[in-house]
Amino acid sequence: MNKLKIELQHCYGIKKLDHEFDFSECKTFVIYAPNGAMKTSFAKTFKDIGGGKKPCDQMDDSLTPVYNISIDDSGKQIAPEEICVIEPYNEKAFASEEKVLTLLANEDIRKEYLDIYKELDLAKQSLIKNLKRISKSTNCEAELIATFSVGDKSIYEIFSSIIESIKKTQGSFNFKYNDVFDPKGKVQAFLNENQKLFKEYYNKYEDLISKSDFFAKDKNYIFGTTEAKNIKTSIDGNEFFIAGHKLNLKKYGDIDNKDRFVEILDEEINKVFNDENLKQVFEKIDKKLDANEELKSFKKVIEKDPLLLIRLDDYELLRKEVWFSYLKQALADVETLVGLYLDKKQKLDAIVKKANDQKSKWEDAIEEFHNRFVNLPFTLAVDNKSDAILNIETPALSFKFDGKPVDRKKLLDVLSQGEKRAFYLLNIIFEIRAREINNQKTLFVIDDIADSFDYKNKYAIVEYLNDLTKNKNFYSLILTHNFDFFRTITSRLGLPRKNKLHAIKKTDLEIKIIAEVYQKPPFVTWRENMKSGRYYDKNYTDIDAKKHIIALIPFVRNLIEYSGCENSSTSYGDDFTVLTCLLHSKSDTKRITFGDLKLIYNECLNKDDFDLSVLTTDPVYNVIIDLAAGIVDNEFNLENKIILAMAIRHLAEEYMLSKVTDTTPINGSQTGELFRRYKKEFKEEVNHKEKIRILESVNIMTPENIHLNSFMYEPILDMGIDELKNLHDKVCNLTSK
C-alpha cells in the first residue's frame, strides 16, 4: 500500500473530506485535530467500514453517506479486515466480564469463539430451565456433572455420551429430586447407618419374588415389581391393544385391553408389598425415619412409593436412572443441545488449537506489557485452564494483585483509573500481536490512545507506536486533539514534515487536512519573522511581520513576569506595565508605539529588527484594531486569534468604561472587574441584557487567548477562529451604538 485515498461525505458529522495519504516514504501519519474538527467521526467511520457496516450521518438519515477508501491508484477499496481502529480508553469496556478468558487475541476469532459459546450456553440454559421444572432440583447442572462426569467431562460432553441411554430408559419417577438425593447427603447417611435393615427388606422382597406365581427371579434374570411397573409405563397409551395385539400371561391367559392388564399388574405388585413380613420391615424403617425430622420429605416419598425401597441398595445407580427419567421428559431439548455441540465442536477444536499453538507468543506479549508499563500493582500470566465447552486445557489469562491471585472482575474493582488504562493497553497489545503473527496487512486508525494517561505511560505508548512503524505490514493514522502529544509523538517518531498534519474545519463544514503549521513553537517562529520580504518566502508580507510582532506581546509580557525583571525602558513605566497597557484599556494604551516595543524586545528577546516599513512612531493600538478588522481567513492561524482576542478586549473595555459610573482604576483582572461593575449597574435594564451576554463571552473567551506561554497555547489552537471573529463583530456593534 503506497497510497490511501479517502473520500468521505455525511459520515458522523463529516460533511466532506477528501485527502490522499502517501505511505511510500513513511508508513505513519499523525494528525492534530482540534476538538470538533473530525477526530471521533473519522475513527467511527473507519470502525464501521472495518466491521462491515455502513457509516451514516447520525443527525440526518436522509443524507446519503459516501465512504470511498481506496488503495494506490487502482481504485480498489480497502478490505474490512485490513482496518483496525484503536479507540481511546473507555471504562465501559470493562462493565461486564466475559465468561471465557481464553487467550484468543485476534478479535474476529475471539468473537467467533464467544458467539459459539453464547449459542451453546443459550441452548444449555433452556434445557436446564426445563429440567429444573421437571426435577425441582436446586442445582441441575452441578448435580448432572457430579452424577455423570468421568475424567472431568464438560456438561456438553456428558449429554453427548448419555443421550442414547436417555432414549432407551423406561423408568419413570415423579418425586422431587432433592427429596431423595439431598445436597447435604442426609439420605445417603441414613441408608448407610441402616444398611442391615434395608438389606433385610430387600432379601424378603427377593424371596417373595422368587416364590411368586407371577413374578420370577433366578441367577440370570429378574422380573419383579420394578420391571412390571416399567412395562405398565411403556404401554401408557392403549395403542398396543387397539392394534389388535394381545398379551398372554401364564397365570391369566390372553389379555386384550389396557385396563385389565394394569389391574393385574397393580394386584400382583400389591400382593408383594402387602406381605406381612415385608410390611413389618418397612414399618421399622418408617419408625426410624419418624425420629429424623430432616428426612421427612424422604419419608413421604417411600411411603407413597414403597417400590423405591428395593432400588436404594444401589443409590448411585438409582440417581442415574432418575436423571435418565427426567431427561427423557426433556428429550427434545437434549437433542437440540447435543446436535448443536457436535455441529460446533470441530470449529471450536480448531480455534482452541490455534490458541494453544500461539501460547508462547502471548507470553511474549505479556512480558512486553510488563516491560513497558512499570510500577503497576498487578501482574499477568498465561496459565492452562479448562475450556468451558471442550473441557481441554487452553491458555488463559490469570491475574495477581500485589502477588496474590485474583479474578478479573475483582481486579478491575480495585484498580485506579490510571491502572485500568494500563490494563486496557494490554488488550491493544494482544490485538496488534495477533496481526503480527498472522502477517495481516493493517491500517491502524489510532484515536487518542494516550488521552488521559499520565506522562510515564504516555511516553511508553509513544515508544510502542514507534515500534509499530517498523512492521512492514502496518500503516498508521494517529489522531489526537492534544497538541502537546502531537508534538511529542511526531518528534519521537522522527516523521518527515509531510507526515505531520493538521485538520481544520472550513466554514462550510468541509474538513481540510493540511501540512503542519508550526514546525517550531510559534513564539520562536514569530521572533524570527518580524521582518517582511524574507528571502526564502516571497509571499511573506508587511502585514505578516506586523502580526508576528504583535502576537509576541502576551508572550514577552509573561517572560518578564516569570523572570521578575522590571526594567523602565520607556517613559510610561516598566516593561511589564507597558505591555499590560497593550492588553487592557489604560490611560497610556493609545500612546505606546512600535519604537517602545523595539526597546522592550531588544531587552527581552535580543531582537529589534522590525520591518523597516513599520514606522517606530506608529501607535501599536491602532495597528491591533486595523489588523483585527482585516482578518478574514479561518485557517489554522494562531497569531490571528491572538490579535482578534486583543482587539476584542480593548473594544469591550472601552465600551464598559464609557458606560459605568465607577471608573476607578483597576489593578489586576481588569476585564473581569469592569464586567462586574457593568453587570451590577445595568442588569435590570432590558436593553442591556444582550450586551451583558456579549460582554460575558468576552470575559470567558479572551483570557486563554491573551495569557499564554510556551507550554499552554493548545486552548487557542482548539478554539475556532470563526468564534472569535463572530465575537469581534458583536463587540464592534456594541461600540458603534
Image: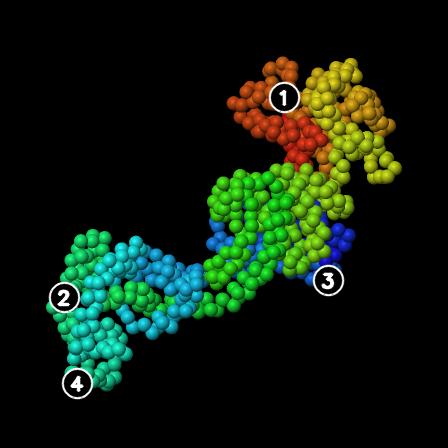
Looking at the rendered image, the quarter that the N terminus falls into is bottom right
Is residue 703 shown to the viewer in this render?
yes
Q: Residue at x 65, y 22 (%)?
A: 653
Q: Quadrant of residue 67?
A: bottom right
Residue 151 in picture, x, y percent from top left: 43, 63
Q: Can you identify the residue that label 2 sits on?
A: 279
Q: Can you identify the residue that label 1 sits on?
A: 669
- For badge 1, the amino acid type reads Ser
Q: Residue at x 17, y 60 (%)?
A: 286
Label 2 crowding class (10 Å Cα cut-off): few <14, some 14-19, many 20+?
some
Q: Residue at x 68, y 22 (%)?
A: 584
Q: Are marks 3 and 1 in contact (CB under 8 Å)?
A: no
Q: Can you identify the residue that label 3 sits on?
A: 74
Q: CA distance from mark 2 to mark 1?
A: 104 Å
Q: Is 480 in front, or is 474?
A: 474
Q: Residue furthest left?
A: 276
Q: Are marks 3 and 4 in contact (CB under 8 Å)?
A: no
Q: Is 39 in front, or is 270?
A: 270
Q: Are marks 2 and 4 in contact (CB under 8 Å)?
A: no
Label 4 crowding class (10 Å Cα cut-off): few <14, some 14-19, many 20+?
few
Secondary structure beneath dot 4 equals strand
Q: Can you identify the residue that label 4 sits on?
A: 253
Whether 643 is drawn above or below 591: the answer is: below
